[in-house]
Structure formats: C-alpha cells, structure tokens
Image (tube, helix red, strand yellow):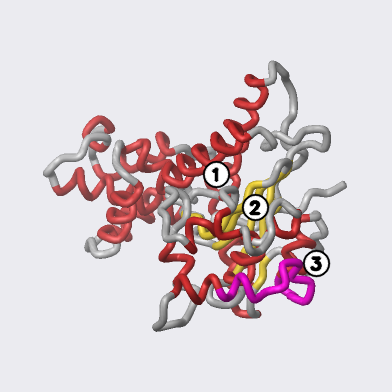
C-alpha cells in the first residue's frame, strides 16, 4: 500500500495524532503520562515549536502545534522515540511501541484552528474519562491550564487566545466556546476532515483532505511544500552538505574555514557567515537549527543573518558563484 507523502511547510499549524500498538496502553500508568508531558515540553523548547492544545489518553495522544523551520517529522521522531525507549526500559521489553506513523493535518489560522483546539481538549469527555463539568480540573488535557490560567510549560496562551476576536476576557470566551459545543462535534465539517486524516483516510488526488483552509491557503501550502522538496532534492542530487557548502563559500570569498566557523569582527567573515546562512536555508533547504548547530549560534541568530544578508551589496554575485 502506498504511503501518503507528508505535507511539510515551516511555521504551519498542525493537528497531530499518534497511537500505540493495540495491545499496549502505555499511558495508563500515571508516571508515563507525567514523563510524556515532561518530554513534550522539552521537545517544544528544543525545536522552537508552540503548542495550542493537547490531550493524553491511555493509548494515544492529540496535539495542536505550530512548527518552526524544523520539520514536524523531526519533532515527532524525537518525542515518540524517547517515549518508546522509556516504556521499553520500564517494562523490560523490546520492539515497536507506536502502531504506525503519526497522522497530521495542516490548518489555517483564524479560519478553523479554534475548532480543532476545542476538539482536542474535549477528547477526554468523548472517551468517558471525565464529564464536561469535570473538564476544568481534568489534568490530562491542556484545557485545565487555559481556564485556570496556570502555566504548564506546554501551552502557548497567546497563540490560543489570539484565535478569539474579543475585547472581553479571552479565558471566558474560550471556556464558553468549549462548553457550549457538542463534545462529539459530529456536525463540524472541519472535525470530520481531521477525523478522516487521523484514520488514514487521505485522498491522493484531494489535497483538502490533509490541508484544511480556503482555496488560496491550500494552494500556498502545496506550493511551499513543492518548493521545499525541490530545495531538498538540490542538496541530495548535488551531494551538498553544510560542510561542503562552507568549503565552496570559503573558496569564493577567499576565507579560511576555521575563520568562518568562529564569529569575528572582520566584515568579510561576517559576510561569509551570512552567505552560508542565506544559501544554506533559502537555496539548499537546510533548517535554521542545522545551520545554528554548525555555526555554534542560536536559530534566531541564523534568521538575523539571513535578513542582514539581503541588504549586503554584491552578495547576489557571490550567491550565484556558490550555487553554480
């Protein structure tokens, strides 16, 4: 059976679902639930992702997250691998823990995002783990932190409340929005699409089954995804690594590699580092995190280098020389 190619674009909002194999209920143990939330917080910080909604069941979990320039696959690989390793060590077992690759749907901000935030937070009510009245104090859903204004190290309150156009109390509006809904969300077209995606019911010919939004949004996401794959293909086909790219830049700019790898006050060194950041990310598709690790700086510093490089006179000629 063919596997649906995952749509990946930077800084996108995703609904993500991941479940364990049928015979395991790895989160039935409260300590595993606690460990999962600890690792989720660590992963969010490590990859500069933001979380808008989460719920944790005995056998699976749901997230609504905003990605960074790091792919959603890298984020989920890190999270699920540490959870699986911990569970196997605790139960002295080996083998698969999660049943299949995670499902993901990209959603449009200010269009359908709050529907999915609500859907995820109502998951414990649908499963019978708590009632709607008990949800405000239910600790395995992000809803409790939002309505009680409790920082949990996971949820980005600003991102959540930004979905509600109000001059009133956003907490009250969010709470009313959640509590006034049918917990099954059966009449919600957006949620029907999310459920289909979670069940693996993608349509290869219909992109709206894995990108949810208006026509312009879907077209933009597909175009970004296509361009990303082209950039990735470039450095794979040309066998370009960050190290070989650095050597190209040093050759074109008359620099030594050791100088480029250490920030200095010389203009030519700064220009070389900015060129590496710009060409590496924008042309060859390396992530900010990849370049940040290589140069020994933060991801935001790489973003600043890219922005600064656009203002340097004559850099376009150097870019052509490096990329040719």
Q: Is residue 184 magenta?
A: yes
Task: Categorize mark 2 by other alpha carbons within 10 Å: few (<14), some (14-19), many (20+).
Answer: many
Q: Position of residue 123 (x, y in %)?
A: 69, 57
Q: In this figure, which residue is indicated by the disc labeled 1?
A: 75
Foreground mark, 1 or 2?
2
User: Is 80 above or below relative to 164?
Assistant: above
Dot placed on the residue nearer the N-terminal end, 3 or 1: 1
Q: Position of residue 220 (x, y in %)?
A: 58, 72
Dot placed on the residue nearer the N-terminal end, 1 or 2: 2
Tell me which secondary structure the magenta stretch mostly adopts: loop
Q: Nearer the viewer, residue 197 or 233?
A: 197
- Left of 95 or right of it: where is 168? left
- Left of 129 or right of it: where is 323? left
Do residues under tags 1 and 2 come within 8 Å of each other at their CB atoms?
no
Dot placed on the residue nearer the N-terminal end, 3 or 2: 2
Residue at position x 31%, y 53% in the image? 318
Q: Position of residue 152 (x, y in %)?
A: 44, 49
Residue at position x 27%, y 45% in the image? 273
């Amino acid at each position: 059976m063919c596997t649906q190619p995952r749509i990946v674009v930077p800084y996108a909002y995703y609904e993500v679902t991941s479940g364990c194999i049928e015979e395991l209920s790895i989160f039935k143990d409260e300590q595993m639930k606690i460990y999962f939330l600890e690792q989720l917080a660590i992963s969010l910080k490590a990859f500069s992702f933001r979380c808008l909604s989460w719920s944790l069941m005995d056998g699976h979990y749901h997230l609504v997250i905003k990605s960074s320039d790091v792919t959603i696959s890298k984020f989920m690989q890190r999270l699920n691998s540490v959870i699986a390793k911990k569970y196997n060590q605790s139960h002295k077992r080996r083998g698969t823990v999660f049943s299949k690759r995670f499902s993901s749907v990209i959603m449009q901000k200010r269009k359908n995002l709050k529907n999915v935030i609500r859907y995820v937070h109502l998951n414990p009510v649908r499963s019978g783990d708590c009632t709607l009245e008990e949800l405000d104090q239910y600790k395995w859903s992000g809803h409790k932190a939002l309505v009680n204004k409790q920082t949990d190290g996971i949820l980005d309150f600003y991102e959540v409340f930004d979905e509600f156009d109000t001059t009133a109390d956003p907490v009250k509006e969010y709470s009313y929005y959640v509590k006034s809904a049918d917990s099954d969300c059966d009449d919600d077209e957006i949620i029907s699409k999310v459920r289909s995606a979670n069940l693996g019911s993608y349509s290869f010919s219909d992109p709206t089954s894995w990108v949810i939004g208006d026509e312009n949004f879907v077209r933009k996401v597909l175009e970004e995804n296509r361009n990303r794959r082209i950039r990735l293909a470039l450095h794979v086909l040309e066998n370009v690594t960050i190290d070989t790219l650095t050597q190209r830049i040093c050759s074109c700019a008359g620099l030594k590699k050791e100088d480029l790898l250490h920030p200095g006050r010389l203009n030519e060194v700064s220009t070389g580092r900015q060129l590496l950041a710009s060409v590496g990310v924008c042309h060859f598709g390396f992530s900010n995190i990849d370049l940040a690790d290589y140069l020994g700086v933060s991801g935001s510093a790489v973003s600043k280098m890219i922005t600064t490089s656009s203002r340097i006179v004559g850099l376009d000629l150097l870019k052509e020389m490096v990329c040719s």
